[in-house]
Image (cartoon, helix red, strand yellow):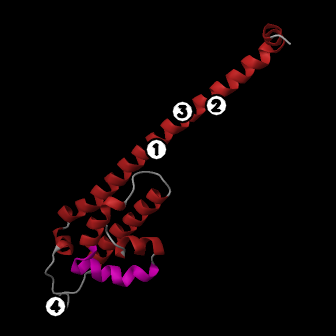
Amino acid sequence: MELSSWLGAHWFELIQTAGIMGGLVFTGISLRREERTREVSNLLTIKQQYSDMWEQLYERPALFRVLEREVDLHTMPVTEEEKLFIKLLIGHLDAVRRMSKAGQFFEIGALRKDIHDFISLPIPATVWEKIKAFQDDGLIELVEGPCD
């Protein structure tokens, strides 16, 4: 069969197939753009929540103690307010870790050093040791694993 006669007989199927293929390509491009928009939106939401939590330090100056390297926990143990603040930060970190693992936005690897530095402080370390048993293995690995 000659090409022109084949095209004459099957032109509709050819156009239909090209339309379907074009629609699939367009859908793929749209999905990728939507995914990038969602990643940016998630990142902005996480950063806002993070800022809101740290803003508590300025609203409640007693919380500044959680950032001190020299703290006598025997004389003045960790307060309930400090415990709650640390738990909120660790809960936030776990949410970020889970979203990162699900591919919702950036890789968390670059933050490991910050996490380690924070958890090495006396008050966060004390709270972490008390709540660690209730955390999932992935969070424990993030907090206690190497910070290459």
Residues drawn in magenta: 119-134
> Separation of disc 1 and disc 2 at Cα?
21 Å
Q: Which residue is mark 1?
A: 38
Which circle's residue, 2 or 3, is located before the other in the chain?
Answer: 2
Name the side, left or right, on which 27 lies relative to 44.
right
Q: Which mark is residue 124?
A: none
> Separation of disc 3 and disc 1 at Cα?
14 Å
Name the side, left or right, on which 65 lies relative to 87.
left
> Separation of disc 3 and disc 4 at Cα?
61 Å
Magenta region includes residue 32: no
Residue at left offset 20%, top offset 65% = 57
The amino acid type, in three-letter code, at marker 4 is Thr
Name the side, left or right, on which 42 lies relative to 51.
right
> Separation of disc 1 and disc 4 at Cα?
48 Å
Disc 4: CA contacts within 10 A as few (<14), some (14-19) or many (>=20): few
Which circle's residue, 3 or 1, is located before the other in the chain?
Answer: 3
Disc 1: CA contacts within 10 A as few (<14), some (14-19) or many (>=20): some
Tell us which disc is closer to us: 1 or 2: 2
Do the residues under discs 3 and 4 have CB atoms within 8 angstroms? no
Whole-percent x, y for residue 42 in the image: 42, 49
Q: Which residue is mark 4?
A: 75
Residue at left offset 37%, top offset 59% = 108
Tell us which disc is closer to us: 4 or 2: 2
Q: Which residue is mark 3?
A: 29
The answer to whether residue 136 of the structure is visible from this angle is no
